[in-house]
Amino acid sequence: MDHHDDTLSMLPHQPVPQHLPAVPRGLAKVVIVLAVALTVFQLVTYAIHSVPSPARWAWDVLTLISLAAIGTVIAVYLVGTLWLLRSYDFAKLVDPTFPMRRSRSWTWLGWWVPIVSLWFPFQIVDDVRRATAKGETRPSPALWWAAWLIANWAPQIPMRDDGGLLVTSRDAVSVVAMVVACVTWISIVRGITRDQDAARG
């Protein structure tokens, strides 16, 4: 026993792993549900507007969807940024030396501050993903961010009146981009959650 204890004392000191907080799995699930809901609202809205002469009930549905979409957008922002903030803090504990390009306050501010909202959220999500992965290679979230920007900015492009063809095409591009953004965002959230689980062992 004494010889065994002496041998152990000669081994290099192993640092005690820093305690990691609980994985924000519940928030991640809500983030995914809200993203899907917002995408479905946009798909239904596009479908109703695409019908030449929609029935009266369709306009009633559109009114309800518009009201629900407002609440969903607010929830997407609040829950999504809360999840991102928790994930940011988690990533900093996983890899304290990782060079985060933005401070944690930008997890909230980066989405709506003019100009910087075009790239700050992308950088934050990218850094959180890479830091949580502890040096392992992860795909860039560039496709998600490009699709998100197109989905939000395409409807703002002014179109001349040509019988609705250009407007319909513009809205179709926005809807397709929204679907791509939703699918890739779900993949990102699930990927970060898996890395968080792996970091906790």
Image (cartoon, grey):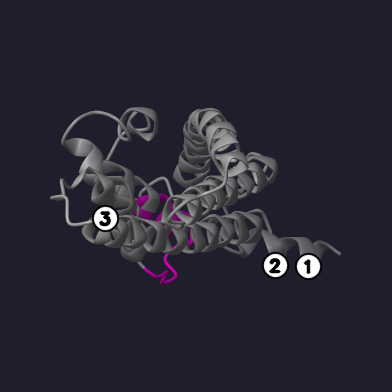
Mark 2 highlights which residue? 7
Q: Can you say whether 61 is above or below 147 in the image? A: above
Q: Can you say whether 147 is above or below 81 in the image? A: below
Q: Is residue 51 magenta?
A: no
Give the mark, 1 or 3, whose residue is nearer the N terminus.
1
Residue 58: quadrant of the picture? top right
Q: Nearer the viewer, residue 167 or 192?
A: 167
Image coordinates for residue 80, horizontal then vertical, percent: 51, 38
Residue depicted at x 15% and y 45%? 158
Amino acid type at image mark 3: Gly
Mark 3 highlights which residue? 164
Amino acid type at image mark 1: His
Contact flag, marks 1 and 3 (Cβ < 8 Å): no
Residue 94 in view: no
Mark 2 element type: helix
- What span is in magenta? 126-139
Mark 1 highlights which residue? 3
Q: Nearer the viewer, mark 1 or mark 3?
A: 3
Mark 3 element type: loop
Residue 128 in view: yes
